[in-house]
């Protein structure tokens, strides 16, 4: 083989690229609303890391995200030739090896779902995707987000895989507190700056990851698999069951089981949260409780945005899904399978409806609209409390979501 031929072949392979783009299937994105009203699928946190962060760590190169139009300013990408990878798919070693073996003339599919392909002009990716040549099939098991509940269903396994990815060949900072007891310490990794006081950490059923500058107050009870990310706080007496992730800068207390906080949200006080997904900048007032099991033990129905109706989740245990910037008043009660949109303010005695539209203000007795200007003032204050700025880019995203969700606020006379 001549040098020119060898060099040409080398350019075909993925590992020579210094950049890739995570795209999203519009149908899957709709299935993951309201979480994806304000973020691309690849920005969803599951396990310890966001999906985009997993891919970057596995591949060791920078990523961009091809998102819905109203999110482009917040999540930009470089429009240059790149490999396009499905942002709803969770990477693993086998899949990475298979993608690395692809040539630029090949595309990789899981049934009718595109996994990866090379694209010369990413801006026109969705126009060219169905003309992919040399289709190859991937037949091995794969992790993928298809529905909202997959986020908590797959969370335990993702904590395990992210734990290995983040801690390999590293040494835990350890816990110096003499009143904290750790079961199976080899499966507990504590980042520098974390503070733990008089708590019990049990990693016998799965690893426990404690991020930088995390504060675990007195009386914390933690069972793995569990992850708490940078700058987050566990309140006194918090009870954290397995398969749970607390995102960065969250403050969480009470009892939590198999749930994912994306980040920057608060559930500081007592109350139960199970099999749920909480967006960013949310607040669950004191004694907020979610049901995750029906009294008759039948499957739980969950609101589907694409169907515009409730659908059978196939799950016996399923809690609530709450979009970014939504707030629950004290002693709020949420029925199993409740879906709450972006920017809602829910309060009052009794259970609200199982589908609460974005920017709704009220509760069981009825709703009005959380006016956009007032909402923005609240959002700016909430972000300032955690040292963040309510930027014009963030404002534009939320204004776009306000307009696209207007049809769901059927009480709004302005519609």
Image (cartoon, rainbow, N blue to C red):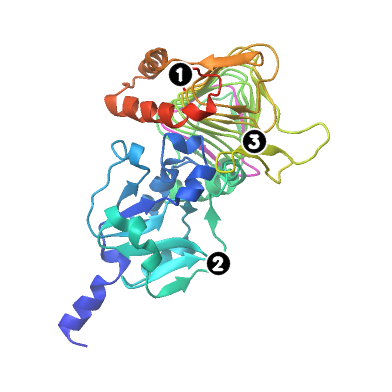
Report the side of 392 relative to 260 (left or right).
left
Q: Which mark is residue 341?
A: none
Q: Residue 187, can we see it?
A: yes
Rounded to the nearest whole Å, what is the CA distance between mark 2 and mark 3? 27 Å
Residue 242, compared with residue 291, is above or below; it is: below
The residue beneath circle 1 is 414
Question: For the residue labelled by badge 2, is the local secondary structure a helix, a strand or a loop?
Answer: loop
Rounded to the nearest whole Å, what is the CA distance between mark 2 and mark 1? 51 Å
Magenta segment range? 194-213
The residue beneath circle 2 is 140
Give coordinates of residue 65: x percent, y percent. Answer: 34, 47
Of badges 2 and 1, the one in the foreground is: 1
The residue beneath circle 3 is 275
Mark 1 crowdedness (10 Å alpha carbons): few <14, some 14-19, many ≥20 = few
Rounded to the nearest whole Å, what is the CA distance between mark 3 and mark 1? 36 Å
Give coordinates of residue 187: x percent, y percent. Answer: 56, 44
């Amino acid at each position: 083989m001549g040098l020119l031929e060898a060099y040409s072949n080398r350019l075909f392979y993925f590992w020579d690229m210094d950049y890739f783009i995570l795209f999203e299937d519009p149908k899957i994105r709709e299935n993951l609303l309201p979480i994806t009203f304000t973020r691309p699928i690849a920005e969803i946190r599951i396990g310890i890391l966001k999906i985009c962060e997993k891919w970057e760590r596995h591949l060791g190169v920078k990523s961009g995200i091809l998102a819905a139009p109203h999110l482009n300013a917040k999540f930009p990408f470089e429009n240059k030739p790149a490999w396009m990878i499905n942002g709803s798919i969770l990477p693993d070693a086998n899949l990475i090896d298979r993608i690395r073996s692809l040539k630029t003339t090949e595309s990789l599919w899981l049934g009718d779902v595109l996994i990866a392909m090379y694209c010369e002009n990413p801006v026109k990716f969705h126009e060219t995707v169905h003309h992919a040549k040399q289709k190859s099939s991937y037949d091995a098991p794969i992790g993928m987000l298809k529905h909202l509940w997959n986020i908590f269903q797959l969370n335990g396994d993702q904590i395990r895989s992210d734990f290995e990815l983040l801690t390999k060949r590293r040494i835990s900072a350890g816990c110096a507190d003499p009143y904290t007891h750790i079961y199976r310490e080899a499966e507990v990794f504590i980042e520098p700056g974390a503070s733990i006081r008089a708590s019990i950490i049990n990693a016998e059923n799965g690893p426990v990851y404690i991020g930088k500058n995390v504060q675990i107050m007195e009386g914390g009870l933690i069972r793995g698999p569990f992850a708490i990310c940078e700058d987050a706080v566990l309140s006194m007496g918090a009870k954290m069951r397995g398969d749970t992730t607390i995102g960065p800068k969250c403050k969480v207390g009470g009892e939590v089981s198999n749930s994912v906080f994306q980040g920057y949200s608060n559930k500081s006080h007592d109350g139960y949260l199970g099999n749920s997904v909480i967006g960013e900048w949310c607040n669950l007032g004191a004694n907020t409780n979610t049901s995750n099991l029906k009294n008759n033990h039948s499957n739980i129905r969950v609101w589907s945005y694409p169907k515009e109706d409730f659908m059978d989740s196939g799950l016996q245990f399923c809690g609530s899904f709450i979009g970014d910037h939504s707030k629950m008043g004290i002693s709020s009660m949420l029925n199993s399978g409740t879906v709450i949109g972006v920017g809602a303010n829910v309060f009052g005695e009794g259970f609200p409806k199982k589908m609460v539209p974005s920017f709704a203000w009220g509760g069981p007795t009825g709703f009005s609209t959380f006016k956009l200007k007032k909402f923005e003032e609240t959002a700016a204050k909430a972000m300032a409390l955690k040292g963040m700025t309510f930027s014009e880019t963030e404002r534009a995203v939320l204004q776009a979501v306000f307009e696209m969700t207007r049809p769901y606020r059927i009480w709004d006379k302005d519609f």
